[in-house]
Image: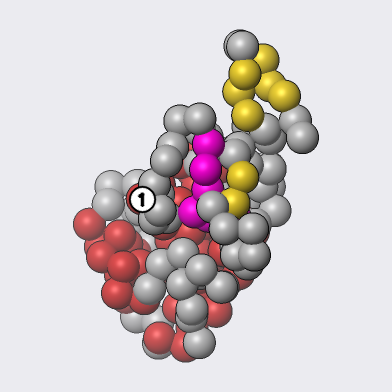
Amino acid sequence: MLEIGKNTYVTIAEADEIANTKTIVDSTAVYWSGLSDYEKEAFLTESAMEIEQLPVAGIKLFYNQPLQFPRRANFYRELSIPREVKEAQVVNAIELLKIKLKEGQRDGKILTSASAELLLKRWSSGGFKLGGGIRTW
């Protein structure tokens, strides 16, 4: 079962909306719509766990939160999960589906999808951006 903030950043309804309306997702979204909720949960959970492997800027908003987002950083001060994180999770989940269907292949460095990594670019610096360089903690 999906639980926002524990094993996913998006609900199935949000994932469906992103898959059906975003140009970042290609025609493979048709396959997504044919999945059961149980199958969507599995792909979304796997995608979220891949996102957890990224080195990200800032610090967790709450020290005991299970997932990396929401975060506090010099450039972001919100209590919610950023839209690009939700989109990246869905894009990556659909890429995982494409691989399972033998319609695609892994092209990301950490995530399955390079497109998902690009969506998370401002977060995946590995540390705060201070004075033009990167300082890791």
Up/down of 117 relative to 70, above or below? above
The quadrant holding residue 17 is bottom left
Give the left or right position of residue 118, taking residue 50 as reference.
left
Q: Position of residue 85 (x, y in %)?
A: 45, 51
Kindly identify which residue carries mark 1.
Answer: 83
Give the left or right position of residue 104, taking residue 50 as reference.
left
Q: Is residue 34 visible?
A: yes
Query: Depth check: 83 or 112 in front?
Result: 83
Q: Position of residue 100 (x, y in %)?
A: 58, 71
Residue lying at 38% horizontally and 62% vertically, measured from the top left: 28
Magenta-tinted stretch? 68-73
Up/down of 73 relative to 28, above or below? above
The quadrant holding residue 42 is bottom right
Q: Residues within 10 Å of mark 1 (few under 14, many from 20)?
A: few
Please say whether residue 69 is one of the residues in the magenta stretch: yes
Residue lying at 44% horizontally and 37% vertically, measured from the top left: 76
Q: Position of residue 97 (x, y in %)?
A: 51, 68
Residue lying at 60% horizontally and 23% vertically, measured from the top left: 129
Residue closest to the far front? 63
Query: Depth check: 9 or 46 in front?
Result: 9
Q: Secondary structure at mark 1?
A: helix
Residue lying at 77% horizontally and 35% vertically, measured from the top left: 137
Residue closest to the far top? 132
Q: Position of residue 1 (x, y in %)?
A: 50, 87
Q: Amino acid at mark 1?
A: Arg
Residue closest to the far left? 21
Please say whether residue 27 is one of the residues in the magenta stretch: no
Q: Is residue 98 visible?
A: no
